[in-house]
Image: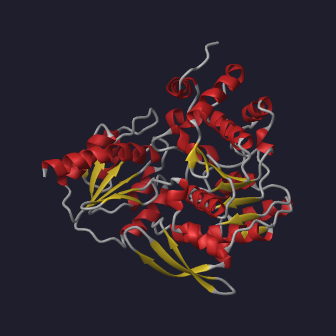
Amino acid sequence: MDVFNSYQQTLDFLYQRLPMFSHVGAAAYKKDLGNILSLCNALGDPQHAFKSVHIAGTNGKGSVSHMLAAVFQQAGYKTGLYTSPHLLDFRERIRINGQMVDEAFVVDFINRIRPEIEKINPSFFEITVAMAFDYFALLKVDIAIVEVGLGGRFDSTNLIKPELGIITNISYDHQAILGNTLPEIAAEKAGIIKENTPVVIGETHPETREVFVQVAKERQAPVYFADQQREVISAEYTTNHLQLTVKDQEKEQRYWLDLNGEYQEKNLLTLLSAIRVLQQQGWKLTDAGVRESLQHVKRLTGLRGRWDIIAEHPLIILDGAHNEGGIRQITGQLARMQYSQLHIVMGFVKDKDLNRILDLLPKEAVYYYCKADIPRALDDHELAILGIRKGLHGENYPSVKSALKAALKLARKEDMILVCGSFFIVGEALGAVTTLTAEKHKTG
């Protein structure tokens, strides 16, 4: 068995040898925890060596994970953060105090675990979860914020015994795997609720509330519904910041966030409920520290791709919204924006319910239908046909870069370009935009 000597060689092995959900979809998803249990057992069960917070949900779990990591970092805790997918660099998935995992560790880990890989043929995601757990244990983090990949009950991250579980919200996504109704999807995500471990639910929904209440009761887990404890009573948006005033039973408090999507209002309420529980458990998270950290989430944790403003004149915004709930949130945000003409660069993967999604999008925009460079991506021509049937007029392009280039060519300084539909689309756009905007300015 060859030993990997370089980071690139190791990455090539990960991408080519292991089944990836981003490439092949449901075929890479296993409805059991056998592989991750075997991997962790071979590593000495690192998942038990650190404290953690476990975060699930259809939308918002990435933002809440990064916000909570920022709060712990600001408070002086050595904080691990595991999220997915990555946008540009595989190492974005595994961070400690905002710093990505070392390339040398990735190489060493794969060489160590290689015999187990050959024996059980785990998925790409299973390997990355085991890698994160091993890294957090080795570097002795005080706390790890662990984001669920898909669902909850059978997600590879569901080996940890956290201090707190968080479920941000429930919306339609991955129905072929998680179920066709909101209660079915909620039941899968409720799988992260552990015995005698508190859980915060971000949004109360009449179809899912009882699912969470019942599972929590069975497991003797205290349950808190964030939107029943606090409310946002005012919101002010600027280009790069969001100012929110939050009211609870005791007081009003103002927060400034460097994450400025409208949907961060709900995420903030979820975060504040989680922090209250963690404070009661003895974690030293001060209200002043929370306010300070929320102004610097991007700098502290490296978060990208959530209503991410990357250029002005024209305004270019990247958002990884890729399901009905996410698209509904960004269309609400668009209603607050001022621009002359809206250009939407958009692509999806094959397993999305596009009938629901496309009905939500604005008909006055110009569309640039494109395809991410992954096997699971929906063909750009097929997407264009579906979109035009819905009255969303535009043209199709074979790549994200070519679609973005066309949008930049047509957009005027007072226009807005939105890139959405998939984190893979956003990642490719992020990689291409610097070159393209430089070319646009050079040519005048």
Of 331 and 411, the residue lying toward us: 411
- Report whether 402 appears left or right of 66: left
- Determine the image quadrant of residue 73: bottom right
Q: Could you tell me which residue is drawn at 58 percent across and 57 percent down?
A: 66
Please identify the residue farthest to the top as the structure is shown: 1
Residue 297 in sight in this render: yes
User: Taking 89 as reference, is 411 above or below it?
Assistant: below
Q: Could you tell me which residue is drawn at 50 percent across and 26 percent down?
A: 8
Of 110 and 407, the residue lying toward us: 110
Q: Position of residue 205 (x, y in %)?
A: 63, 68
- Determine the image quadrant of residue 220: bottom right
Residue 347 in sight in this render: no
Q: Position of residue 65 (x, y in %)?
A: 61, 57
Q: Position of residue 135 (x, y in %)?
A: 68, 40
Please identify the residue farthest to the left as the structure is shown: 444
Of 224 and 255, the residue lying toward us: 255
- Report whether 287 appears left or right of 415: right
- Determine the image quadrant of residue 285: bottom right
User: Taking 406 as reference, is 32 above or below it?
Assistant: above
Count of numbered badges drawn on the protein: 0
User: Taking 402 as reference, is 170 above or below it?
Assistant: below
